[in-house]
Amino acid sequence: MTIQDLKSQNLILFEVISGSKSFGLNTPTSDTDIKGVYYLPKEKFFGLDYIPQVSNETNDEVYYEIGRFVELLIKNNPNILEILASPEDCVLYKHPLMEQLKIEDFLSKLCKDTFAGYAVTQIKKARGLNKKIVNPLPKEKKSLLDFCYVLHEGTSHDLSVQGAIPIRDWLIEHSFDASHIGLAKMPNVRDIFAMFYDHEKTLGYKGIIQKETSNEVSVSSIPKGEKLIGYLSCNQDEYSKYCKEYTEYWNWIEKRNEDRYNTNQQHGKNYDSKNMMHTIRLLQTAEQILSTGKLNIRVSNREELLDIKAGNREYDDLLKMADNLIASIENHYQTSTLPERPDEHKAIQTLIAIREKLYQ
């Protein structure tokens, strides 16, 4: 089912302009995001083809089935509460039955965990993004060999990594070929291997790694009496960590929004300023709900938030601002007169009443 199907079959119950335009944070370059609520044709709802959500390819138009919408309202999902609280000038269509879903029936202390909790997740994401911007990773991926070291003579008895040198440097120093080396596991010692060298390459040694993309060193069968030439330390944990960071970084490079990235580069503060703006807005919204018991998504501090988006604030100052808001939210949570959670029974009865009217 597509959005066009919803419109052509008159299945839409609620449709709003969401995002920056509904918050009052839009600028001339802002996109128009559309969100909405629909109901399914009777045969799909009562049959086996339940469809909880429909969106376009770019996800800037998303519609929720009425049951899914109510379910998320009960959970105090920030995006869904903000859809229901859309300002009148952003409402494109509203079926009379939607009047039965009132925002005051869903606001609860859960917003501390949903709004503020989501914002904290975004702060962590911003910290991670800050790390990606400040510490770019080269496109050429390191191999496991770059995480292998040889212990110097004199350190083999205590197996200390102090004084160890990179295997690549050691191979050059001794004019050795990595493919001629045989490794044997050391008993009772993790990631330390005894090394042997086959000058003639007749003993069937597998080398240190079989190919550059190997995730483990190769262990060989070593004949008795072969001369030990040293000990190799392989930092497998650090290599695994590097591989994860490499994959995350280049996935981010591939998927990042170039306009946002260029804006972040221009303001030179090394953080995603749009992400931080929305993080602060979410925290301020949670503070508003808990202190007033109401939700007004049209912001009163447009200039402050757009100043953050423009990258005119220091990263550490924004983190401090967020910490202060989180502390304020905790205080308001203790004194808020809101219920712990929405009245789920009432919400379900309202949903049933709406569906009875739709399917009668």
Image (cartoon, rainbow, N blue to C red):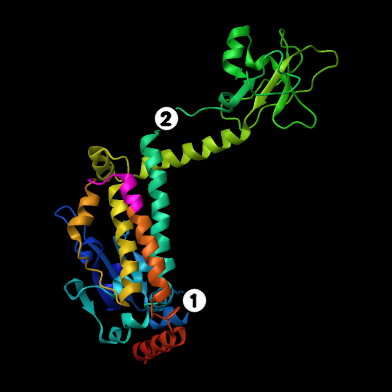
Residue occupying the point 52% across, 36% down:
243
Q: Earlier in the sequence, mark 1 or mark 2?
A: 1
The verdict on residue 317 being magenta is: yes
x and y percentages locating residue 214 in the rendered image: 60, 30
The residues colored magenta run 312-320
- Amino acid at dot 2: Lys
- Amino acid at dot 1: Leu
Asked whether 334 or 355 is in front, the reply is 334
Asked whether 64 or 108 is in front, the reply is 108
On screen, residue 337 versus residue 192, left or right, reads left
Q: Which residue is mark 2?
A: 139
When the figure is inspected, residue 40 is found, relative to residue 239, above or below; the finding is below
Q: Which residue is mark 1?
A: 48
User: Predominant secondary structure in magenta?
Assistant: helix
x and y percentages locating residue 121 in the rendered image: 42, 56
x and y percentages locating residue 161 in the rendered image: 65, 24
Q: Nearer the viewer, mark 1 or mark 2?
A: 2
How many angstroms separate mark 1 from mark 2 (CA)?
47 Å
The answer to whether the residues at label 1 and label 2 have Cβ atoms under 8 Å apart is no
Asked whether 102 or 341 is in front, the reply is 341
Q: Secondary structure at mark 1?
A: loop
When the figure is inspected, residue 127 is found, relative to residue 354, above or below; the finding is above
- For the C terminus, the image quarter is bottom left
Q: How many marks?
A: 2
When the figure is inspected, residue 79 is found, relative to residue 294, above or below; the finding is above
